[in-house]
Each structure stands twice: as structure tokens, then as C-alpha cells.
Image (spheres, helix red, strand yellow):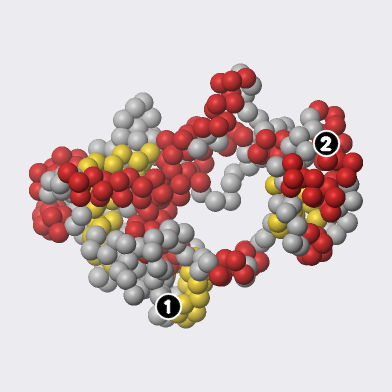
Amino acid sequence: MSALPLEGVRVLDLTRLLPGGYATLMLADLGADVVKVEEPGRADYTRWLPPQVGDSSAAHIALNRNKRSITLNLKTARGKDIFRKLVPRFDVLVESFRPGKMAALELGWESLQDLHPQLIYCAITGYGQDGPRAQEVGHDINYMGYAGALGITGEEGRAPVIPGVQVADLGGGGMAAVISILLALRKRDAEGVGSFCDVSMMDGVVSWLGIHAAAYRATGDIPQPELMPLNGGYPCYRVYPAADGWLTVGALEPQFWSALCSAIGRDDLVGDAFASGRRRAQVIGELEELFETKTRAEWMRKLAGLDVCVAPVNDFSEAFADEQASHRQMVVEEDLPEVGSWSHIGNPVRVGERAERLLRIPPPSLGGG
């Protein structure tokens, strides 16, 4: 089997919790040698989050496969000395402290660059290294709120809905960090120099609002929940109730909407895909009543093989049993020491062949190497 894409790349991971843990998980899955540097006694907080599975937490298991762990107290002279000796052996350092924290320890970018000019230093923060909010504390919900994304999520006239997935943490923090690190590695290969990667979770969320911002600039209308084209504003792009749950309808293109209307016996609605005002409310109400007459499975059987862009809203047990997720190796059953069979969520990045096993190294014990 061919080597994994990032084999030979060594990463020091000083991060805690989700954003950095997810970033270095992606790197580790792709072959990088990731070594977690954890504070003795306290460690990465994900180790202690419930629910617990044996001596580990489910969150720790999810985020830390294929990594190793050492403990080091960076507040002591001895810990700093050991750390400085470690740094030149690594290609990448990732941290998620408040801006200036590492510099106060005399371990910031400028200091480490003198030791290792080719070092790629990635700092993941909520608001970035500079600006009026740089030193503020925050979490996913705060970054989403400031960025404007939370304000367009939910139902018309009701309180914003907190997404079930940590969007700013994973996308604005984790994935943006991975992209930054890969670009910095490319630059180093070309120019022989390291880079500082300033990753802001709020920046990441703002960057995803491009088409919404363009519409706002063009019209002056402030985007609202459930009234935009892709958050429920169109009858052809909404979540509808079934008898036993919910269905997603994403029939934006005329051919898909037409095929759906025909399949459900409502050819009279072909011209109402983008209905507005009172007509919109009428069409949505009629479709809600219609979709509630059958279960999700009954609708999926009725619509099978048709180009209609309809899918069920799965719960986790259904999603993890989905044949497409299994085929794509996005849910992989493998054994873990002291835990047994475990459902690992796969890595979506594909470069060349997939590794025969997703799990090469089990999640490490604290300081277990």
C-alpha cells in the first residue's frame, strides 16, 4: 500500500477541546505523527468530559486516535527547556491559547522561529491575534452570534436555534487550521521558510456568509431565519413533517421540483417552487399536510429512483447504519484496547488510496507516549 499523504510530517499539538483536536485528528489520520503536549494532572479537558467509556471519555476517543501523548509543564524552567529541545524535531506546532499566552511563556512564534526557522506555527483562537476583541473569551455559540450566522438559523419570528454541530469550532477553527497548515507546508517546500498561521473561528464563520452578504449588499434587506432561499424561504427547499419524523426537500431546480410534484400527485404546484407571501404559506401548509400522511420509509419507497432531491432526517442510529456512510468508510467499526468494538467516524479527506485501517494508534493515555 502507498504511504499516507502526510507521512513524515511531525506535529506538536498543544491544543485543548474541539477545534484543535479536530484539526490534528485530520492530520494524524492522513499520516502525520501527532504528539499531544498536555499539562500534568489537568491534560486536555476532553479527557474528562462525560460520557466516560472505561478510563477514557467518548470525546477523547473520538478526537485522539492516531496520536501520542507526553506531559510537560510549560510554566516551569525545566518544562520550557525540554520543550525548546523538542521543537526543532517537529514541522508543525498547533496551539489554541489566548493571543500572547505563549509569548508570555517565552515560547511564542518569534522565540521559536529563532530556534527553528522552518517551523510552521498555527494559533487557533476565537477572534484572531489582533483587533478589539482578540482577548475576549468565547465558544462556538459566541462566534456564530457575532458573525451573523446564528441570527439566520431557526424559524421565522422565533429565537435563534443553536446548531447541533459546533460549526465555528470545526469549520472556522479545525478545518481552517488544516488548510492553513497544508498551505504553509507547501510554501516551506517552495521557499524553505516557516510560517505563522493566524486562525480565527469567527473569521471562518464570516467567510461562509459570502452569498448572503452579496444578497444583502444588492438589496439592503437584512437576511432573516426561514425567509431566505436556502433556510426555508422557498416551498421547494424546506424540512417537512412525515408521519414518523421529518423529510428534507431540496428540489431547487425546475426539473427536480416538477418531478416531485408529479410523483406526489400535485402537478398544480409546479409553478409554486418559489412562491412568496400568502401563496407561499398556502403551498407550505398543503405540502405539510400531504407529507404527514406517510412515514419517511413510505415516502422514500414511493420516490425511489426519481430525481426529486428528497431525503429523510435521520437520527444517529439511522445515520450510522446508512449504507452510503458505510460504503464510504465514514463509519468504521474497529476494536479499541479496554473498550472493545467502537464506531469511529471517518476522515472525509481522500488523497490517493485509503489506509487499510483508520485506527493505527489507539487514543493515548495521558503522557503514555
Q: Secondary structure at mark 1?
A: strand
In this rendering, position of residue 50 left or right of residue 251 = left
Q: Position of residue 46 (x, y in %)?
A: 41, 59
Q: Which of the 4 quarters of the picture holds residue 198? A: top left
Q: Which quadrant is home to the N terminus?
A: bottom left
Q: Residue furthest front?
A: 255
Q: Does residue 83 show up? A: no
Q: Nearer the viewer, residue 272 or 359?
A: 272
Q: Amino acid at mark 2?
A: Gly
Q: Which of the 4 quarters of the picture holds residue 213? A: top right
Determine crowd level at label 1: few under 14, some 14-19, many 20+ residues with C-alpha closer than 10 A: some
Q: Amino acid at mark 1?
A: Leu
Q: Which quadrant is home to the C terminus?
A: bottom left
Picture residue at 35% right of the left edge, 41% below the top: 199
Q: Does residue 154 show up? A: yes
Task: Name above or below for residue 170 compared with residue 280.
Answer: below
Residue at numbered disc 2? 271
In this rendering, position of residue 342 left or right of residue 359 = right
Task: Name above or below for residue 71 compared with residue 332.
Answer: above
Mark with earlier residue (2, 1): 2
Q: Position of residue 230 (x, y in %)?
A: 65, 39
Picture residue at 23% right of the left edge, 60% below the top: 10
Residue at numbered disc 1? 336
Picture residue at 59% right of the left edge, 26% below the top: 215
Q: Position of residue 238 (x, y in %)?
A: 73, 44
Task: Name above or below for residue 207 compared with residue 288.
Answer: above
Picture residue at 50% right of the left edge, 69% below the top: 329
Determine crowd level at label 2: few under 14, some 14-19, many 20+ residues with C-alpha closer than 10 A: few
